[in-house]
Image (cartoon, coloured by chain):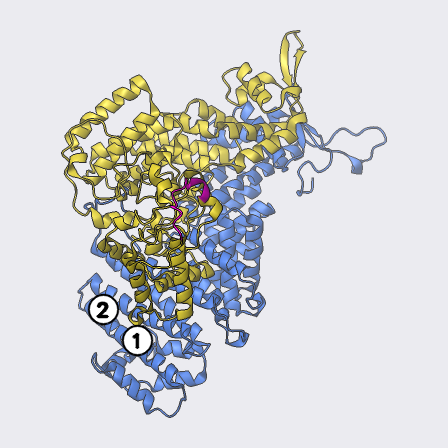
Amino acid sequence: MQAALVPFQEAYATGLAQPVADFLSPVPPPHDPGRLYDFFRASNDDRITGDVKNAFKYNKRTRMSQKETDAWVDIISGYWRAVKQIIRADEAANQGRVGSELYLAEYDAWKDVTSSFIKHISGGALPAWAIFTLYFTANHLRRIAIRADEQLAKGKPSTSTNSFSDDIVPQAARSEKLEEAARVFNRVFALCLGDRNPDMSESRKWGVYCIANLQFKTYFKLKAISLSKNVVKSIQAQSDLPPFELYPRAHRVTYKYYTGVLAFLQEDYAKAEKDLQEAWDLCYARSLKNKSLILTYLIPCRLITQHAIPSAALLAETPTLASLIGPLVSCIKKGDLTGFDKALADGEPEFVKRRIFLTLERSRDIALRNLLRKVYLAAGYDDLKEGQIEKDRIRKSRIPLIHFATALRMGIAGAGSGLTVEDDEVECLLANQIYKGLMKGYISREHAMVVLNKKGAFPGTGV
Amino acid sequence: MSLPTVTAAWPRPMQPPAYNAVTPRTTLQPAHPLATAPSDKGAVNSKPKKVEWPPAVRDYVRRAFDPANAIEGISSTDMQAKLKETISFFAERGAQETNDWPNHPLPQQILQNEQRLAAFHLANSASPFNSNGHANILSFSPAKKRKSQDGEELATQQAQASIPPWRKTNLESRMTFAEGHSEKRQKKSNAAGDAFSKFDQADLDKRRQRFNLGNNGTKTTPPWASPRREEDEMTNAPVVGTNQSLEKSYFRLTAPPKPETVRPLPVLEKTLAMLRQKWKTEKNYNYICNQFKSLRQDLTVQHIKTAFTVKVYEIHARISLEKGDLGEYNQCQTQLKALYAQGLEGKPAEFKAYRILYIVYTCNKSDMNDMLAELTLADKQHPWIKHALDVRSALALGNYHKFFKLYLVALNMGSYLMDMFIERERLNALANISRGYANVTLRFLTDELGFENDDSCREFLESHGAQTIIEQKADESNRMQYRVKIREAAALFESLRAAAFRKVDIKGQI
């Protein structure tokens, strides 16, 4: 055991969270695939606590208080028990035996490790950086929980039809373990947020955002997104956190991304744009996946707030997004309503999955605006009056309703879909554009005309 | 939030119903004298303060000081202060003899519970799941309550309840779930402890265990909101009913039902037939709703989940739709969704369409997203569902013309649901029109906004304070017609529209 703990002592000596977390990892490092097994073989069920204790006792390299030693002994013995379960589950899987109970045992053992971490940190036994080691442990717990849930779901494929005990028909508990893990994360979060240590350099408050991100991730996975709001609220209510800019960039990008998405889902597009933009600006330039994730929400956001479509160059950076949103964007640009509807319908499953469908749908207004603008441009200029020169010519501002109606019908007629656009509906769509400020003017029913402003009939488009 | 069991079942002084809206008390602070005073009717037998403590109290004090009962982290000074507070609380009310001291939680336990609560509040970290793992996502705030949850029907029955639970507010009925007899409440304000003694130690232990599961103050659901688990424990085996009467009033269960109060399936089938007949002839909604709730309860306690169950929920859902009782409707809808998911026969398409319209009404975008994710390709082509989807997309795109046309051809009970938001959408359309046109004929509005005739359109405008913009004019062929100077009321309609969208009254969510 003494030898097996040497890496721990080395990691501990660095005084950094990551090396210690690497030691306490449920997956062996790539350069040493047998590490977990070796560690497991260094002791056995009866002796483990004593072994670790002894190893600590005779180790002269690191000095720690008795209290801290006890804490690490507890954590490392818990880790050993977890490793045992991991190895058992792995072996079973290798032999083709599948059993959810092994994965559950693995989950439970890992949860114990996390819990003893929480216990000792809140007891003040561990150094300040241990909160980040706990973060890594908790993140592993999340993965292990997801895997355990998958196994559970495989174990009983059908919704138990005999669980008739409730009037509210019990939904299949698909993510029982992850839900449980979410409660553990909640405790960790409270542990960070509630730290009263006045010495900021020692404070657990530095862990607030990374744990919050872990919670967001879990809640999104659990489809319990609204719970994330509580986390945000708790953070906002906490007045004595260190300045946001001082947190590690990785924490900030992820946090801003999630708050942006949350605002997006609550249709607060102004805030969403701000947060997502911040995340985008901070995001590591070569982290393609993260950039694509941010853009997934930032682009629809911009469509709503600024009526801006992404440049081709930007879309080209993220191929998946380009294939997803690209067709839609080009239809908006062209003012091709039929194409837009089709692209929207084609992408619907994916859009719905990413929760951007209802927002993208609203950008049809811009496609429509672009089409109407074309009609306006096609109408040309008023005849020159006396004394007027070519440069001062004014575009025709009175456009017959029928012109707009024809434009709207063009796409549909070709499709032969049996759809029609009635005259009143054309008026309705025009009124809508005017109401939303995309077009300036008014409709005159008596003359069947649309009277557009002489200047800035389509604000923001240069005409 | 793990609200401590003991405090929840605490004999707190019951206040007269008028005061029941206050937030649930979790501590044993003496009640505000003003609050109790009106109900006292001299029942505080104005005993002179005793110096001689009853033996039960003395034993209680002894136990409080017993080192075996000490709880780590709670100092003895705190404990003593609490002890004093506890005893004087009952002494002030002359109730120290009536209180069930042997079962009363010790002061250190009370303190511990309070600490947990405080820890919870500090973290303000609501935990997602109530006790049985249901993520009650949409209503995790205890303030947003359903009118009454089916789940609780089982958990709490009160045979002698004099006020039917559905008449009480939800919170109130939850808080007082242990004792339904509200006429006794006033007496209870003095003789507290009466309710408490109803729980025997075993029950209390059970409760304690249950609520201490997540021992760390991370549970959000207060005990009165999550009785499901309770009922899981209580009614694992189905009841087989023996009651033969067709009618039965609904009461919330507080204990496993007795077989003689439950009607077996054949009787229930007759009951349903009778209720349908009665609804047709009498149209007495209160009666019908009550009967349906007891019918549903009987099905539930007997674990009957068949096409018949679906039928009951469907009919109840339709009736509540007809009466615009969205709370009740939503309960049925939630049940139906789950029942259909189990592959039971029914009319899933019809109710999916309703659900879409319901979500349109509530304007809940994330629900709508979930709904869309759930629909299959076949669903989307079904005419009923397609109609609902068209309604959704028409509104999303601001196409009020199309929306009002769809309103006029609503299918099944869809028009009842659409009635819930038709006024709102009319105001929305008027806000649009008032910006897009200078003036229009009344007939145009009648047609565009789906009114039956000019008069009802005019009435609508007038009832919204727009009478001044309607004028009579002769058209080219000298026929008189009403014209509406719509532009002048733009600001009015805009503010009405904004107000209408602000107050979406969500009575319970899926």
Residue drawn where x is 19% and y is 63% of the image: A98
Which of the chains is yellow? B
Task: Place residue A382 in its image quadrant.
Answer: top right
Q: How busy is the neighbourhood of tag 1: few (under 14 within 10 Å), some, or many (20 plus)?
A: many
The numbered disc on residue B144 is none
Q: What amino acid is labelled 2 in the image?
A: Ala
Q: Which residues are magenta?
A: B37-48
Q: Nearer the viewer, residue B334 or A374?
A: B334
Task: Place residue A39 in its image quadrant.
Answer: bottom left
Report the residue marked by disc 1.
A79
- Secondary element under disc 1, as helix, strand or loop, is helix
Which of the chains is blue? A
Q: Chain of mark 1?
A: A
Q: Position of residue A157 (x, y in %)?
A: 22, 51
| Residue A232 position (above or below residue B461) | below
Residue drawn where x is 46% and y is 77% of the image: A128
First in sequence: mark 1 vs mark 2: 1
Q: Quadrant of the C terminus of chain A?
A: top right
Report the residue marked by disc 2.
A89
Q: Are marks 1 and 2 in contact (CB under 8 Å)?
A: no
- Secondary element under disc 2, as helix, strand or loop, is helix
Q: Is residue A54 left or right of residue A304?
A: left
Q: Nearer the viewer, residue B316 or A39?
A: B316
| Residue B48 position (above or below residue B83) | above
